[in-house]
Image: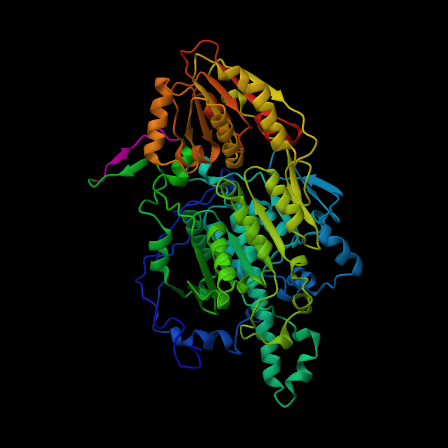
Amino acid sequence: QREEEGKSESEGDDEDDDSGSEDQISTDEEDDEIQGDDQESLGGITENTENNDNHSEEEDSDGYETDEELELTTNGQPLVDASSSASAFSEHLSHILSSEELKTLPEGKWKFKWEAPAIDMPNCRWKGTRHNFLDAVQSDAPYGLKPKLFKHWLQLYQKSGGKDFDSSKRRRFFSICNSYLDILHCNKRPFYNKGREEDSSAMDAYLMHSLNHIFKTRDLVKKNESKIAKHRETSEEEILSDDGFLDQGFTRPKVLILLPMRSIAFRVVKRLIQLTPESQRVNVEHLDRFNAEFGCEDESDDDDEKTSKNGKSTTHKSSKPSDWQALFGEKNSDDEFMLGIKHTRKSIRLYGDFYSSDMIIASPLKLHMAIGQAEENKERDVDYLSSIEVLIIDHADIISMQNWSFLATVVDHINRLPTKQHGTNVMRIRPLYLDGQSRFYRQSIILSSYLTPEMNGLFNRQCLNYKGKVGIRFQASPIKLACEYKGVLEKVLLPVRQIYERFDADSMTQADNARLEYFTKKIFPKIKDSVQGGVMIFIPSYYDFVRVRNYLKSQNASFCLLGDYTKNADISRAREWFFAGSRKIMLYTERAYFYRRYKIRGIKNLIFYSLPERKEFYPEIMNMLDEGSYDMMSTALFSRFDLLKVLAQF
């Protein structure tokens, strides 16, 4: 409509000044290290809004550049022709599902047929379905990337001091992403456990894979449009009868990246801009607005070290753990956001209309709200999720501390048939969309620092890619990674008698009831009439928290609460009551501890209703016990369905 009215794409939007800032991302490996000073600065990128009228003209121009025409070279040697590197992309989308695949894929039943060492990840092995593709991945430059993208990525890597790109983590993980298999990587080193350092290899890899997918999609569409324009004397129906012109989905967005917080989205988008070749980001629209809404006041490399007005360094010590400081210290931890990103020939547009964007970066909460609004108001819709071909869920471990059901709802709504046409040329839509089979072609990549049953369930039942799965984790997922985790018991500093009590449960669905029954019959009678008091019950699940709270009320027990939704005034009162002994029992949820990290005084007896999802919380809670108390003791309840949590402790 803007084009028809002669308006520019950004007319009516606020114009911002350029204030590109630079983030520092680094890895622990010498050959894979990227320092902020060496990274390409965003400061030189302008938000020139004077040329916005040409964006659609640039994008729709027949004179777009291809990698073949540019004849890119690296180290004086020509790169592999782009047509050969497009095989993974074209083969994946051109595959026709057999009747057997259409029957078995919805069942979500997978058999692991191979495993291979995970290089640079000690005690870990990749496990996968189908055939072992790791030995057959493209081992020569540009590794399946568009040559222009590869050359820019290589230059960034070398400029940062990296050596031997071929053997680097980021290149290896990109090759796995480029296989278009579903991926579950549950051993990713999180940045928030390393201060401002992060193993950015995985992020670089999935961002390059996303850019590669978007640019190849655009090249195919533009090439076909050029062919159609050259044969105007032939009827459109006759031209489009050729399957080679079936190159689109219902809507434009092809990549969806789900992240838990604005501060993390800030890091991802900044790196996405850096990884885009300079000729394709001459102008980044609304960069200042993005910095203001997603950034934070302090982006220094050390969260505990600040610089005062007189230029001297000052250190602020906090009682909060380092991972809390990295996530919530002075960071933008808002979890309600959604951002459309559009790539044209020479520019990147942030805050693009979702239907005209190539990529959407959002939080599960925001998309869940949009889905709810669309269900209540028929004028609204979320059809921009209908044609997603690459889904990336990063920092799933943090999302699990928010509300996992929101994420499950969002994934369930991806690749549904749209409710409106949205101006799409139906004659150019791929058959896989028209036949309602797009979910079987969607690649899903889940990244986390640990594994939960919920992640397992999502990966096995809602990620149904026909190409199969691969991953790093315990023996239970399609492409996944089998790892030996380092335990945390050695981090318990106090001489505590630790007791693990196992209860029987017939099935996963019966485990919650069996746990409550065991607690009411075996554990609560021991503490009900305790004169000593000081009993803290740590509960990971809010659902279990409500059930235990209701049971304690029915028993007229003396207790106080520190839960997910407890107000600050009530928290202060509860902590004071518990320490003074006027309340014998305290219920403390894992999510409340994740967000607040309150240390509780006066704990004499600790009960883990279930082991924490985050294994590092176990020693932190254990070390809260009152050192002056006699015979310190902790009790942890578990069943055979808590295998992942138990193994993580040891």
Seen in the image, is 468 located left or right of residue 491? right
At 56% from the left and 51% from the top, the residue drawn is 409
| Rendered location of residue 30, percent (x, y) | 50, 39
Query: Relative to the observer, which residue lies in front, 270 or 501?
Result: 501
Write the residue at 68% across / 48% down.
Answer: 469
| Label total for image | 0
Can residue 597 be seen by looking at this rendering? Answer: yes
Q: What x and y, as percent, mark residue 64?
A: 52, 74
- Between 239 and 588, the one lying in front of the other is 588
Q: Looking at the image, which residue sits at the far bottom? A: 233
Quadrant the N terminus occupies: bottom left
Residue that extends furthest to the right in the rendered view of this protein: 100
Q: In the image, which residues are magenta?
A: 311-320
Residue 224's quadrant in the figure?
A: bottom right
- Residue 206 lies, in percent from the top left, at 55, 52
Is 314 magenta? The answer is yes
Looking at the image, the residue that sits furthest to the left is 310
Q: Quadrant of the C terminus?
A: top right
- 144 left or right of 149 in image: right
Residue 232, picture quadrant = bottom right
Left or right? Give the position of 83 relative to 350.
right
Position of 20 relative to 481 (above/below): below
Is the image coloured rainbow, by chain, by secondary structure, or in one colour? Answer: rainbow
Query: Residue 75: percent from the left, percent from the top?
Result: 55, 57
Residue 39 visible in the picture = no
Instruction: Name the dominant secondary structure of the magenta segment.
Output: loop
On whether residue 299 falls in the magenta region, the answer is no
Q: Can you say whether 554 is above or below 89 in the image? A: above
Q: Is residue 375 left or right of residue 43?
A: right
Residue 220 location, quadrant: bottom right
